[in-house]
Amino acid sequence: MPDKKADIIEELQQLAPGLEPFLNEGERVVPEGYFTELEASILQKVPAKKFRILRPYLYLTAAAVVLVIAGAVFLIQHGRQNTSDFATQLAALNDEELIAILEYEVEDLSAEELIQSGMVDDYSPLEGAELLGAVYEEKEEMPLDLNNTGIIDHLLLDSLSEDEIFDLLDDPFGI
Amino acid sequence: MEWTDDQILEAFKKPHKREQAFNQLVSIYSKRIYWHVRRMVQEHEDANDITQDIFIKIWNNLGEFRGEAGLYSWLYRITANETLSFLRKQQRRPSKELEFSVEPALSAEQALSANSNSTTILRHLEAAIAMLPEKQRQVFIMRYYDALKYEEMEAILGTSIGALKANYHHAVKKIENYLRDL
């Protein structure tokens, strides 16, 4: 209990002379040892201990969740970005470049590998004579349903002269 | 060694020192808060419950304390609000004045006599304080018993110093008259 300050006592004496002795609370008591118990009781009630025990697990769980989410987001974004970049780059290429790339890419692949890779199949449209040659060089014969018209339809005509087209029609496998 | 308010606040921000800081806070302020509440509500059991609730509130909110006012003022504000909240709920219950009215009355001479039984005088003092309006009771206890400056009370209660002095004046006069009229 704070000590009475002189100015407070003086103020009271001016307001009500003689009252001060009757404001004494000497008899106001609390149970013995009460304040020690009060402190203990308060400290028991606050969730400090529980919080301290849980905190490391809480942090670990939070960190794991954040990592998983961050990883998932990264993978999704990265996948999208790659797809998007690839599509953008592909769209920017002209036909000649596409053919050149295809020629380059398929150079080291066998026809079987190309077919297995999904780049081409037995019946799919094929771009360019070189590609056709690469794909079918190991095959004994042309697919039955792939005729000359089908080949011409799927060639990139812009990149070939008329003579080259007819040469191809005459000899599609460059033999 | 007792910590300063600043040390308590600084330590409370650090998770590994939070509990220690709060222990210090409880150790320093629990008596003061209890006695303020006890004078306001009179009954020990009520004061005990309210004091514990106040400290739980302090624990829950101390992390958000930004230090605009001093820690002491902030604690007092919580204490004042919690106590008034209790008293307002209690008003719906039977008045404490009825309890005091059955006590044997003292004559004016007895009441203001130094030879009167101190326990009886305390009972009448409690009754005199209990009949004060909430605001006057609060101001009287803060000023006379808690020995707060008017500037501190202004910061805690948000009431002007002039109004606080007027409340104190009225409270003192009412207590004096109550005891004289016994």
Image: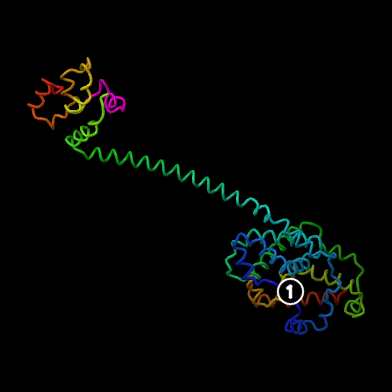
Residue B35 left/right relative to B19: right
Q: Residue furthest top?
A: A144
Vertical comparison of B64 with A72: above or below: below
B173 or A153: nearer the viewer: A153
Query: Residue at the location (64% across, 72% down)?
Result: B159
B149 or B109: nearer the viewer: B149
Element carrying mark 1:
loop
Give residue A94's quadrant in the image.
top left
Query: Residue at the location (79% across, 70% down)?
Result: B129
Residue B60 left/right relative to B101: left
Give the mark count: 1
Q: Is A121 included in the stretch rendered in magenta?
A: yes
Vertical comparison of B99 with A24: above or below: above
Which residue is under mark 1?
B146
Question: Please, which chain is the residue tagged with disc 1 on?
Answer: B
A32 or A5: nearer the viewer: A32
Query: Residue at the location (23% across, 24% down)?
Result: A135
Can you give x and y, in whole percent of width and height, for residue B128 in the image?
82, 71
Quadrant including the C terminus of chain A? top left
Can you give x and y, in whole percent of width and height, for residue B133 in the image?
74, 68
Can you give x and y, in whole percent of width and height, for residue B118 in the image?
89, 74
Q: Is A97 included in the stretch rendered in magenta?
A: no
Vertical comparison of A76 with B171: above or below: above
Query: Residue at the location (76% across, 57% down)?
Result: B92
B92 or B113: nearer the viewer: B113
The span shown in magenta is A112-125
